[in-house]
Amino acid sequence: MTTTDLGLPAGVELTPLALLLLGKQADPASERGVDCPGDLPAASDAALVERARAAKAALGDRVFILGHHYQRDEVIAFADVTGDSFKLAQQAAARPEAEFIVFCGVHFMAESADILTGPGQAVVLPDLAAGCSMADMATFDQVEECWAVLADAGIAERTVPVSYMNSSAAIKAFTGRHSGTICTSSNAKRALDWAFAQGDKVLFLPDQHLGRNTAVLEMGMSLDDCVLYDPHKPGGGLTPQQLRDARMILWKGHCSVHGRFTRASVDDVRERIPGVQVLAHPECRHEVVTAADLVGSTEFIIRTLEQASAGSAWAIGTELNLVKRLAAEHPDKTVTFLDKTVCYCSTMNRIDLPHLVWSLEQLVAGTVPNRITVEPETARHARVALDQMLALP
Ligand code: 13P
Ligand code: SF4
């Protein structure tokens, strides 16, 4: 392909893109692909910025780029819309005219976008290695086995599955088949209100922390109303009586990023920054959210900072790309990361400018790269659960 084909001015040098592509060449000693045709260009590489701009301009209205709040700045700069997973799902569903949805986020989000968009639309994930460790903590077979355990305890019929968006399409389809709903961190309470109007127990998948925090902090339940189902133990590690007594059956899964914050992180930041307000995402552990001043989704965190008064100090318990961006956007406030150790979501960070440029240039050249498609029967059932979420009051 020439620079002119890509809509670039003559004389622009094309830097070889350094991409680790899964599925291209096998490296038995590594989980990763080994196709890496060049040195990693700097994120601020002016030629890459220009190439992304030119490819996006060449595609025009045919492409719509979604960017999750945890994406790198260099990627967010090219997003048509940014949001949390709920807003991005809504936005994907609201763009029937876009031929290509380039999803700068992680795999489960791209799957949901594919389910919510039409057959003529292609959803592209710029790097297939952008998965989610939490979503991987609940496999379809494990969840089916759990349902059989609930049936043996005589409670499956009274249990409503509520699955966090951060789950595979297969888990969403399970949820749809059993008349449940999907939720995100911005509508978990509304999802639980709805679920408890349908049945008297909830199986909450796969994030134990979001389930527990919402049940206890927002629904007035006690910790004793919740039990933890461990898919690696027979019967989930629970007796049938424990299952019958519980109102919330929490799946033993967690986010490896938010799970890092501890009570000690909160105590430490309060000592370091007098008057600091701690703002934590509900994927954090219960000991963290109970010690925090405010708890909410990424959209809530962003709104809170926008409304905060100049001179106020905030320690934020969520992914670092977002916290750094908030610090840059609010120079009149002290915005700090809740933990002392730097920690990004490694899979969110897989999407970088080289991968975005590669995806866009492939689309300009007439190839759809890294298309995410959900098998139709799975998509049909998953859509029921996603539509239920989108219809929550
Ligand atoms: P939200 O986008 O719902 O805030 O979730 C955070 C997250 O971990 C996404 O992967
Ligand atoms: Fe998954 Fe946590 Fe990363 Fe979100 S932040 S993609 S839940 S590992």
Image: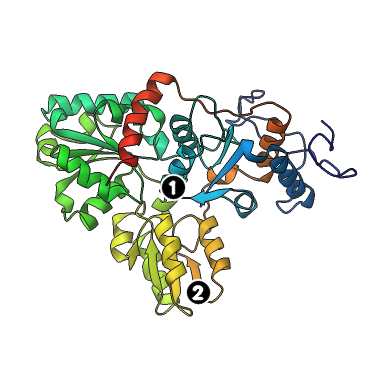
Q: Residue 367 in the image: state x and y as whole percent.
A: 68, 26
Q: Relative to 345, say whether 335 is above or below.
A: below
> How busy is the neighbourhood of tag 2: few (under 14 within 10 Å), some, or many (20 plus)?
some
Q: Which of the two labelled residues, at mark 1 and mark 2, occupies the earlier sequence position?
A: 1
- For the N terminus, the quadrant is top right
Q: Is residue 53 left or right of residue 252?
A: right
Q: Residue 142 in the image: state x and y as whole percent.
A: 31, 27
Q: Residue at x 23, y 33 (%)?
A: 236
Q: Residue at x 59, y 33 (%)?
A: 100
Assess whether mark 2 and mark 1 are in contact (beta carbons under 8 angstroms). no
Q: Is residue 276 left or right of residue 175?
A: right
Q: Relative to 198, say whether 222 is above or below.
A: below
Viewer-proximal residue among 171 and 360: 360
Please, what is the three-letter code of the amino acid marked with disc 2? Thr
Residue 377's quadrant in the figure? top left
Circle on res. 242: none
Q: Residue 287 in the image: state x and y as whole percent.
A: 29, 59
Scheme of colours in the image: rainbow
Residue 318's quadrant in the figure? bottom left
- The CA span between labels 1 and 2 is 27 Å
Q: Residue 393 in the image: state x and y as whole percent.
A: 27, 47
Please, what is the three-letter code of the amino acid marked with disc 1? Lys
Viewer-proximal residue among 286 and 108: 108
> How busy is the neighbourhood of tag 1: few (under 14 within 10 Å), some, or many (20 plus)?
some
Choose mark 1 or mark 2, whichever is in front. 1
Residue that numbered label 1 is attached to: 87
Callout 2: CB less than 8 Å from ligand 1: no
Residue that numbered label 2 is attached to: 334
Residue that sits furthest to the front in the current view? 97
Question: Dot 1 lies on which element?
Answer: helix
Question: Dot 2 lies on which element?
Answer: strand
